[in-house]
Amino acid sequence: MTIEPHDRRQIEQLLSHVQGRQPGRGVPGGQMVVLSNGLQVTIALEQGQHAGEGDAGETRLWLGVSRADRFPTFAEMQMIIAMVFSASQRGAGNPLAISTGLHMPNLVLCSSRISRPDHRAA
């Protein structure tokens, strides 16, 4: 699957906007765009654990993907995950958690810890 250049720019702009903000508290709300194929993509920077991983106060990058009429396909998710999480993944010590469910606001919800530089360690 290829992603339209306009959709790629939308996701990149959304990601840069979210990553420039400080994390908040609560359920990830984030910023949302609708792609040309009908997928709704939401990206947020929030604190909290996901799928039983991490601490409640840990900063995570969240990705929610939905579509009104169907689940996102594997190829669609693979492409979007690669775009959103490529910069945040730091090997096995920073796993990507993925959940799916019809009962959730997002049909597919992914999250990964964000490595923040420790300014005290200099």
Image: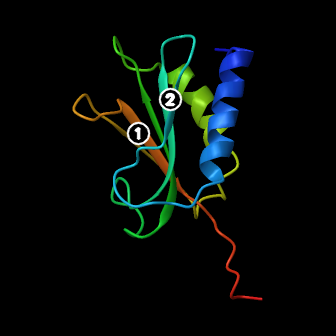
Q: Nearer the viewer, residue 59 or 18?
A: 18
- Amino acid marked by disc 1: Leu
According to the picture, the residue beneath numbered tag 1 turns out to be 109
**Label 1 secondary element:** strand
According to the picture, the residue beneath numbered tag 2 turns out to be 41
CA neighbours of label 2 inside 10 A, class few (<14), some (14 to 19), many (20+): many
**Image coords of residue 17 (percent x, y):** 64, 44
Question: Is 37 rendered above or below residue 62?
Answer: above
Q: Which residue is at 57% across, 61% downward? A: 22
Residue 20 shows in the view: yes
Q: Which residue is at 48% across, 13% downward? A: 38
Task: From the viewer's perspective, tell me whether residue 25 is left or right of residue 75.
Answer: left
**Image coords of residue 73 (percent x, y):** 47, 19
Q: Nearer the viewer, residue 25 or 59?
A: 25
Here the colouring is rainbow
Count of marks, rendered view? 2
- Amino acid marked by disc 2: Val
Q: Quadrant of the N terminus?
A: top right
Q: Which residue is at 37% across, 19% downward? A: 71
Question: Is 48 rendered above or below residue 112?
Answer: below
